Image (tube, rainbow, N blue to C red):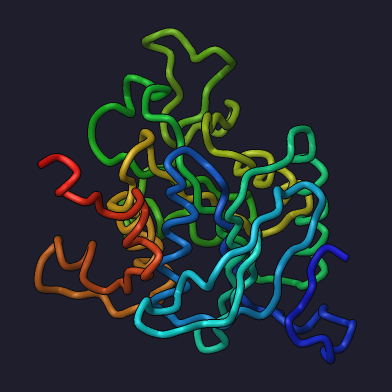
Amino acid sequence: MFYIPCNKTKVKDHSKEWNGYSLVVAAVSVGNVGQLAADLIVSTLEMTNVGYIYDESILPVVGNNPYSAVSHSSCSLVTGCEVYECTEKQLVVVLQRTPFVKGKRSGFRKRLVKWIKEHNFNQVVILTSSFSHERLDSQLDGSQFRFLTSPSMESTIGDLFRNKLKWKQLERRPSFPAAPSGVENNNNDQTGVVYIPGGGIAKTLFTDCCSLDMNVIVLLLFCAEGDNAWHAKHLVTLLNQWLALVPISSNSEYQQTTGNWKIPPSWRLTFGSAFDPTLYH
């Protein structure tokens, strides 16, 4: 079984369980930006853990609930790929915490697409990131955020993203390696190929969903490895401009970026615990 619900008494027919819901998939990518952004969504909305994905393609891991406050004991555990739900926002989040087993990525993707189709989600949002050193010349300046939509979504809300939200569409490339200087595709040119280095399964998952005529969008940031907490906050804030998951502060741009998201307790030890200064006396 690919998906195992926490409530084992649920009916086997899930076709209407999440009908009309939005699905957020956090891709394991450079800097873990998509996963960190999903962390903020789950923590802020206090989403319910409704199940987990058990698959041979994901490296096994088990740990304590990352959303439990340090001062409170918690007996709940998390695994390598959890599924969270918020009925109020009609939102489901698939949060993968571990990398893939070598050679198993394609099989996981196919099973995930089948699961998405069975649950009849209204739209799929893939959160990811891409290597900043792989950017085109035209991507060096300005916003480091890009979006990519399926044909079905492009025809309905593509103008909203570009004209109202002022989002930049991911530039496509004529071929690999990148096109020579002076012949890069513009933002609206859909004749090239999608290129998301470091983006994990984002590109192939997007392609698979498009082939089944699903509503799917990729949101990504160019970045490098390091402390990517800011990138995650920025990415999820841009997502919030569209889905309105939390109230947006109007006091300042800084508060819009950081003021509305609840930081998970697990982020306190992102880079390990503090060292004992007496070691250096």
In percent of width and height, residue 258 lies at: 23, 65
Q: Residue at x 57, y 82 (%)?
A: 75
Quadrant where the image shows the C terminus: top left
Quadrant where the image shows the N terminus: bottom right
In percent of width and height, residue 60 lies at: 70, 53
Q: Residue at x 83, y 63 (%)?
A: 2
Drawn side of residue 264 relative to residue 151, left or right:
left
Frontmost residue, 68 versus 75 = 75
Residue 25 sits above or below residue 174 on the image: below
Residue 229 sits above or below residue 13 on the image: above
Residue sitting farthest toward the top? 180
Q: Residue at x 79, y 39 (%)?
A: 104
Q: Which quadrant of the figure has residue 233?
A: bottom left
Q: Residue at x 63, y 49 (%)?
A: 151
Drawn side of residue 109 relative to residue 266, left or right:
right
Frontmost residue, 94 versus 217 = 94
In percent of width and height, residue 100 lies at: 69, 42
* Count of residue discs: 0
Drawn side of residue 255 relative to residue 59, left or right:
left
Drawn side of residue 254 relative to residue 147, left or right:
left
Frontmost residue, 176 versus 151 = 176
Frontmost residue, 279 versus 110 = 279
In percent of width and height, residue 144 lies at: 32, 39
